[in-house]
Amino acid sequence: MKLYHITNNNAKAVAIADIPVVEYVALYNDLKERMTDSRYHVAHYFATEIERGLKFYLIILDDTTGEVLITSFIPDYYAEGLASLTALHPQFHPFEREMNELYGIPFDSHPWLKPLRFPYDRRDKESTMDSYPFYTIDGDELHEVNVGPIHAGIIEPGAFRFICDGEQVLHLEIALGYQHRGVESEMLRNDNRLRHTLIAESTAGDTAVGHATAYAELTEKLANADIGDDLKRERMIAIELERIAMHLADTGALATDIGFQLYQVACEALRTVVINTTQAWCGNRFGKSLIRPMGTNHPLTEEKIALIRKNIADVRRRYNEVREDILEAPTLLARFEQCGLVPKSEMERIGGVGQAARASGLRRDIRATHPSGFYAEELKHEPILKHDGDVMSRLATRMDEVLQSADYIESTLAAYKPAGSIPAPDYKAKFQGDALAFSLIEGWRGEICHVALTDSEGRITKYKIKDPSVHNWLGLAIAVRSEGISDFPINNKSFNLSYCGHDL
Amino acid sequence: MLFGKAKILRSHGWQYIPNLDAVTLTEEFRGFPLLTATEDSADIEHAAAICPTGAITTKPLTLDLGKCLFCGECQKCAPKNIRFTNEHRLAATRREDLIVEVGQTAPKFDTTAIRPEIAKYFGKALQLREVSAGGDCSVEMELNATGNVNFDFGRYGVGFTASPRHADGLVLTGPISQNMAEALDICYNSIAEPKILVVCGSEAVSGGLYADSPAVDRSFLDKYHVDLWLPGAPTHPLCFIDGITRLRKKHKR
Ligand code: SF4
């Protein structure tokens, strides 16, 4: 029996009728083996309510061939439970936890089905933020440190509980959900697609461009639309600008946490140049309003191209000075090297993605493995890999990626004469009915995946968003094990994961 | 090595903006909107229908900055009726003053609504505790930016502090997620009187896209007096700086 429908990130939406509905046991047995190979990882896995029970959809990515494997199953209504995949492959944990929290599905032999984000529509209303079941260890020598939900700085809320032996962290558990706003259900409130685009932008405001592009590409697949080369090119520029801005922010934040003010202030100023460039392009420092379905309200002009090129060249030069000095700064290296190790094998187990995975030597980068848009056609992206999996590697990945993105922007814009052919956005295009559409975008944190299902009229009936943080939060918890608790801040900054993107 | 640092310093140059009140943002920036009524209301009805947060009323034509996310789409639909200027000073001391009317040429900032003790107690120094309750991280980053090398709001004695016990007020961001509602309340009540409450970002002011979401609980705002309302998605650092400056009656112009 055929287990998967095979497609890729450039294909149009998939007719639901083309997605096999398989026996869970057969799928389970296949995944048991398949997922031991790190070329595969889970991109999304969710359940949706159907007339009688639930239907599950699973999307697996093959990084080697660029194939996307989609399957579904409908467990027997009276079935007692499903054998847990997390028990075999920890990378399934957030997905199984989510489905347990929403629908009460008992995944058999799951190590611990903890709540994921306390959504308003969770099944067990008795389970609240305050009753999160933290792991504990008994012992006279141990103590617990509770941090949050409100943290010392101006950042989003989340609760961290450390179990420490003296200064050393034995275990960190991260309880999230404080930021839950009901993003996925607000996507279904009405069919105003401008509103949907803005919801996508606000999914994680520091990744406004990434999430809005994921929404736009998904809807373009549903509308069977080809958007033209210039729009693809301009979206690439926008995504890479966002990547540069956030990597600069994180370089500065890492410097702040070790009291290295020179790098901090230099990076603050450089990030300002980049986001002010984005503001001069579209009116918003975070690129909100820039990405729209099928077109744009802010096509690049000769003047704006010249401004971007000038500013990015300047930022590249000045940032490179910072980068070179960082690589020779013994006090910085002493803190960052060999701190917060996440070996490649661990990254594979937890399904790590994005810049953090690449810092551990795991080649996960949608721009190379599952490219769409400009990345698929023009740009032959080669991911930057580091191999130590420590704080320094995560910083070094960011530093090299800034230069790489700046080069992409420069080489692309140097050869770009806008023809003025990009249309205005279209919020009304007809969507394919009874279809599943997904989009995969490499945001600055990593892999963003949006999935939508439509009914026979082409109306979206289910919208699922996965921010890369969903995979990577566990990476942070692993990184700080056996480190001094005072090294938590630099580890946290080296990942810089999204709370709202996780909590939705 | 020292050479490297000298190079960074030289390239870094002089970053801070000497007069924060003299800045004019890029033409592209969408700030205060000018509204014009026309005989034909078809465009404006279209704009009101597409507005993702219902910020526009048609009869009479108004635009609520507290709901607006400054996406600019209404201006595309009704260019004769709505034109965004790059005026970033959008703060208001009363929620209703954020509703812009036809013919209004500048934001309303009613100084009579400012409690007199604010300038008295916080005129020299003001330390704030920020709480994000469902904020999307962009407003939070802009608040961080107010203290960076460019804006350096700290030079006027305004900063953010870790403990609510050390704070003179609270800055709220986000539509107030249910799961944060209690922590927000506890934090606010941990701040000693006298204190101020600043609501920052359109999502915090009105709930924004999440105004009707069942995952949001906005009862906090029914309970406490708000001293300053700051629209924006996110609120621009200069909008925050201008609002706080005028609230403390430090405004020069
Ligand atoms: S700019 Fe503001 S008022 Fe206009 S459509 Fe967007 S959110 Fe609505």
Image (spheres, rainbow, N blue to C red):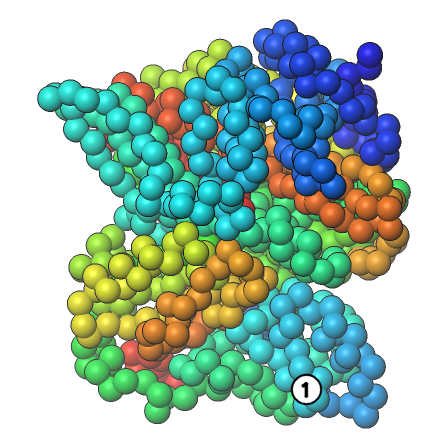
Q: Quadrant of residue B217?
A: bottom left
User: How many numbered discs?
Assistant: 1
Q: Is residue A196 left or right of residue A458?
A: left
Report which quarter residue A225 is drawn in.
top right
Where is the C terminus of chain B found, in terms of image quarters? bottom left
Nearer-the-camera pick, A282 or A499: A499
Looking at the image, which residue sits at the far left? A140
From this view, report whether residue A228 is shown above or below residue B63: above
Q: Residue at x 22, y 35 (%)?
A: A145
Q: Residue at x 31, y 27 (%)?
A: A135
In the image, A162: left or right of A75? left
- Measured from the top left, where is residue B170 in percent x and y? 31, 65
How many other residues sit within 10 Å of disc 1, few (<14), some (14-19) or many (≥20)? Answer: many
Instruction: Name the spot of residue A72 as percent of width and height, x first.
Output: 73, 26
Residue B233 position, x and y percent, is 54, 62
**Residue receiving disc 1:** B61
Amino acid of disc 1: Leu
Report the residue that reaches farthest toward the front: A78
Residue B2 image-quadrant placement = top left
Subunit ID for the residue under disc 1: B
Residue A457 visible somewhere in the drawing = yes
Q: Looking at the image, which is closer to me, A241 or A453?
A: A453
Query: Left of A410 or right of it: where is B222?
Result: left
x and y percentages locating residue A435 in the rendered image: 83, 39
In what quadrant does ligand 1 lie? bottom right
From the image, which quarter does the N terminus of chain B lie in? top left
Residue depicted at 17% across the width and 28% down the height: A143
Residue at point 43%, 31% (across, down): A114
Under tag 1, what secondary structure?
strand
